[in-house]
Image (cartoon, coloured by chain):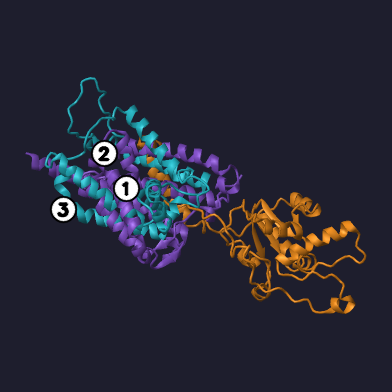
Chain colours: A orange, B purple, C cyan
Amino acid sequence: MSKLFSNMTTQKKLGLLALILGFFAVFAGSPYETNKITINAKDLALMAQKDVDNVSVQQVADWIIKGNFDFRIIDTRSPKEYADYHIPMAQNIQLSALLNQNFYPTDKLILYSDNSEKATQAWLLLKAKKFKNVYILKDGLNAWKDKILFPKMPANPSEGQMAEFNKIKEVSKFFGGTPQTGKRGEQGQKKVKKMPKLKLPAAIPQGAPHKKRREGC
Amino acid sequence: MMAPFYKFGLFGSEVSLIVAFIIGIGFGFFLERAGFGSARKLAAQFYFRDMAVFKVMFTAIVTAMIGLFYFAWIGWLNLSLVYLTPTFLWADLVGGLILGVGFVVGGYCPGTSGVACVTGKIDGYIFVLGLFFGIFAFGEAFPWIEGFFNAAPMGQITLSQLLDIPYGVLVFIVVLIALGGFLLAEKVEKYFARKDAEKAL
Amino acid sequence: MDSTLDTLSVPKTETKKKTKERTAQPYWNPYLSGFGLGLVLLAAFVIMGRGLGASGAYSTVVASGVNAIAPHHAAGNAFYEGYLGNGTTSPFKSWLVFEVLGLLVGGFISGALAGRIKKTTEKSEHISFKMRYVYAFIGGALMGIGAKLARGCTSGQALTGGALLNAGSWIFMLMVFAGAYAAAYFVRRQWL
């Protein structure tokens, strides 16, 4: 038997190897099965504890205004909630669909939900899939509403605070929000805050302007 | 580090160009090794005189296919991150047909014509000129062809999904087809070699 | 059924032999060459997450040429636009362009090592040089059209897609062989 093997030419040996490997492939299942994950629990726990992957609403607002679009914003809520209102440029992707997307593990992704729960769950899934640049919008849409769309002016503002608030007012207006100046008194503040229409100011491009990855022949 | 390395951020797009160059060297090297810088050798495939095109192509496909399968199976390679050209049924069918005709008429394909040029083949250079012209013609006609170009889009789909056969089974089938094809190719070559020798007498 | 070095494959050429030239060595065994090629392809998959290609690089050249001569026209054409990008980087900084440059180098190295660099024209004794050149040009043009229509050529679609069991690529590959065998009869004088 061994003599037969050593007498074979190289290509016959390769052919035999291919045959054997091909045969075992039949029993091996689909190579596209990417449902299993391995987690480095310690690293993830540490990151979660230190809030390493958080990003604030002010930061995101700033990036959008500056036109710095090297990231994707992902809304992890239901399609209906997304349709009602979403942060400009955000894509609506459910948790179950998140891993089927054509994202690269190096893509910069910012996840948000109403608070942070769904976003955090999504963060864990993506991190386990070895994604490197995944961030959670701290306090999610609630913070976005509170701080960006409907920022409240502090009660007795100092000069510095007033200047700060004026800057925030501009940001708010950019996104179609209504700054709460509190001058209308208590009644004004109890009014239902209207969410700005989804029609964005011309300054923000519709849809994510991402480089087309040309990988064909 | 998981594969594909580039998509996991091991290096940036600048370095990827160097990687491209090095991989290209390997590509061109083996093409020339096989004799694919020669139009006569390439065209001989389609007269059953020399089945090297079939042998080289299918050996390469089987090698890479098995490699991909097992790297993915052990979880080292994320196969869904490897780019799959979307299938457009009509464009693929007709494009393949035209390309086949061009192959036997011209004697080269884009890759092999490059190898032919650097090894001195004048017809290789002229073929490349033809290539440029053909691409230019396509580009100019594109507004009218665009519909056909994008017709019957089937997305990124594998044979396994299309035929509803498990991937691993398909791998084995391809190996069998290749090995069977090689045995047949050897016989066919010998047959025509004998026939040509007889004719010469 | 032993096939060692392929004896059918010593190249026949039509030019005068220079006495100083190295004799061309026989080609490598196609199975071993194919294995080497397969490993290169696998390396591309593993390192880059993409396969090989060739026609795309030629398209970049054409698109750049059109852009240089008639930029407005190129800008309005979706096909050229795809290869020119958005203007922030040179279209030549493309993976395929660099890969094809490497292909030229690699082909040259192999040819030089084997003494196969020679100014020649590949054809049979039965047609003239001029006819061969005409056929080469026409063949190239058809190949260019076919490759762009099919979104790839034998390297990009057949080899790469073949290894990935891509449905469109296998359909493409079948049609390439079909088309070539069908047309072979009509140009047999060129080769046999």
Q: Amino acid at mark 3?
A: Phe
State the mark number for residue B38: 2
Q: What x and y, as percent, mark residue B61?
A: 39, 49
Give the chain of mark 2. Answer: B
Mark 2 on the same chain as mark 3: no
Residue name at image x 69 percent, y 61 percent: A111
Instruction: State yes or no: discs 2 and 1 in contact (Cβ < 8 Å).
Output: no
Rendering coords of residue A94 (x, y %): 64, 68
- Image coordinates for residue C99, horizontal then vertical, percent: 43, 41
> Which residue is tagged 3?
C186
Instruction: Say what secondary structure mark 3 lies in.
Output: helix
Q: Residues within 10 Å of mark 2 (few under 14, many from 20)?
A: many
The first of marks 2 and 1 along the sequence is: 2
Q: Amino acid at mark 1?
A: Phe
Q: Going by the image, does B104 lie left or right of B86? A: left
Side of B43 relative to C168 (left or right): left
SS state under label 2: loop
Dot 1: what SS?
helix
The one nearer the camera, B187 or C159, is: C159
Q: Which mark is residue B184?
A: none
Residue A51 visible within the image: yes
| Foreground: disc 3 or disc 1 | 1
